[in-house]
Amino acid sequence: MKRLATLGAVLLLASALTAAAHDIKTDTFQVTGSVTAVDDTSITVTKGKERFHIARDKDAKVTGEIKVGAKVTVQYRMIATTIEAKEEKAAKGKKK
């Protein structure tokens, strides 16, 4: 009976750890500025001299009307889609 209880506790702990691993989130960033361009797939916001071109999809929550010239606050995440590691160059001839 103790073995069954121990097995149940181990399985419960493993499922909790797996669920926690899936909840890892990336940092959220925010920019507030004027809309300089907008379409169904992206929004461009200018803040001072900086321009932020941010992709968006149908699941993005939108409050109010987005149009060029409107002041908006955009919350976004940076997510890598491709990562390519470069091999290090061989060290040049060693000096003695």
Image (cartoon, rainbow, N blue to C red):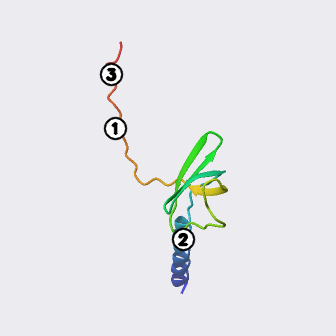
* Disc 3 secondary structure class: loop
Pick whichever, 43 or 81, lies toward us.
43
**Residue reaching furthest to the front:** 68
Q: Earlier in the sequence, mark 2 or mark 3?
A: 2
Residue receiving disc 3: 92
**Residue reaching furthest to the top:** 96
Say if 72 sits above or below 52 in the image.
below
Alpha carbon of mark 2 to alpha carbon of mark 3: how far?
Answer: 48 Å
Q: Amino acid at mark 1?
A: Glu
Q: Earlier in the sequence, mark 1 or mark 2?
A: 2
Select label 1 or label 2 by which is in front: 1
Total count of labels:
3
* Disc 1 secondary structure class: loop
Residue receiving disc 2: 19
- Could you say where residue 26 lies in the image, as x and y percent from the top left? 56, 57
Determine which quarter of the picture holds residue 12: bottom right
Pick whichever, 88 or 96, lies toward us.
88
Which numbered circle lies on residue 44? Answer: none
* Disc 2 secondary structure class: helix
Say if 11 sits above or below 52 in the image.
below
- Could you say where residue 60 lies in the image, as x and y percent from the top left? 56, 66
Alpha carbon of mark 1 to alpha carbon of mark 3: how far?
Answer: 15 Å
- Could you say where residue 31 lies in the image, as x and y percent from the top left? 64, 51
Q: Amino acid at mark 3?
A: Lys
Which numbered circle lies on residue 87? Answer: 1
CA neighbours of label 2 inside 10 A, class few (<14), some (14 to 19), many (20+): few
Q: Earlier in the sequence, mark 1 or mark 3?
A: 1
